[in-house]
Image (tube, grey):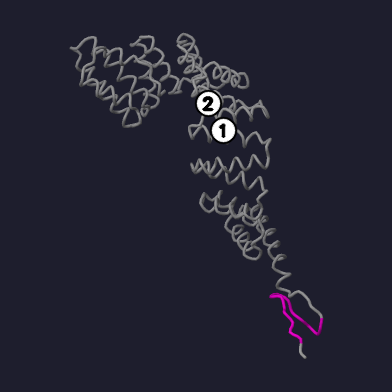
Amino acid sequence: MMKLILRPACCALAIGVAFVAPGCRLKPYQARRQIDRGRQLLQQDDLEAALAAFQEAARLDPRLAVAHSNQGRIYRRLGDYDHAIRAFVEAIRRDSRSFDDTLNLAHLYHFTNRIKEAIQAYLRAIELKPNDADALLNLGVCYQQAGDFEQAAQRFQQAIALDDSQPHAFVNLGVALDAQQKYYEAVRAYKDALERDSHQPIVLVNLAQTYMNLDRHKLARQTLAQAIAMDPRLPSAHEALGYCLFKTREFSAAQHAYEGALALDPKSPRAHAGLGSINMIYYIEDKSQLDRRDRALEHWHRSLELNPNQPRIQSLIAQYSTPTKDPEGELLKPDRGR
């Protein structure tokens, strides 16, 4: 009776001796050759040819995570972020323990403003490598962008515990703490950042803003003077100085500071809003100055054109057409949206 022999798809039978068909053995070998070739082409900066080599490697052996991750790196360099994301997703499917691919995917999600996906990818990266300070710092930035300042502060603190040499970690921590109205802690964080790098005018601006939140306007003014001395062309420093002077009712000096901010950055919504408030106060004090009223409204409208999400400015425009008992008091109310 003839025996029925079941043969594997890529095997052949020869007179009672089984052997693996050459094609089965060659494909992984050929795929590795393509990986090596792709790496050599990358060193030569021939991105298109290298990409083709890694694509061929993935076709020959789809299990090779490295073929997909290298495609992701090339697509990222070419600015094709959607294909880069898909490539890193494929790489992770084949090697779920790859920290580098997971981190690269998180960076791409973050760069393309897919914050929820970025948070999940950074969380997975931290699972794989809990002591990576940069991953923790980036995760904190994502939480901050998502408006979760408590989680952001926690991640910044974890990153600092691993590496307290990076000034920007303390700066981000200060922003997160200030947003939670933990002003004294924010001051400490900004000062820690300045101790590590004293030449940071934007950090001085942030510190001054926190001082203003604490009604320490004199100290805020001194801090802003330092920032302007360090970088006279920093628009945010002049704008913040204008606000500080406005809050202490030094309207002429505040107007000068706001105008200086607009000279450096004509698209500053805060500077336009501030000038609008100052001009309206002058009009309220002397109703004959109709030009002040018109200038105030125009500055407020320009501010809204630049940033429509300003309910307080919208309210002030509406309030002007409906006189209030204390219009000047309305203008001097703290702007909690700063």
The answer to which quarter of the image holds residue 150 is top right
Give the residue displayed 62% in from the left and 56% down from the top. Answer: 68
The answer to whether mark 2 and mark 1 are in CB contact below 8 A is: yes
Q: Secondary structure at mark 1?
A: helix
| Place of residue 330 in the rendered image (x, y in percent of width and height, measured from the top left) | 30, 15
Q: Looking at this view, is 75 or 325 the one in front?
A: 325
| Place of residue 18 in the rendered image (x, y in percent of width and height, measured from the top left) | 79, 78
Q: Looking at this view, is 197 or 153 the one in front?
A: 153
Q: Looking at this view, is 254 or 311 the one in front?
A: 311
Mark number, residue 86: none
Q: Residue tagged by mark 2?
A: 176
Give the left or right position of residue 315, taking residue 140 as reference: left
Q: Residue furthest bottom?
A: 1
The answer to which quarter of the image holds residue 317 is top left
| Place of residue 247 in the rendered image (x, y in percent of width and height, measured from the top left) | 38, 12
Q: Secondary structure at mark 2?
A: helix
Binning the other alpha carbons within 10 Å of mark 1 as few (below 14), some (14 to 19) or many (20 upward) gives: many
Magenta-drawn segment: 3-16
Q: Amino acid at mark 2?
A: Ala
Q: Amino acid at mark 1?
A: Gly
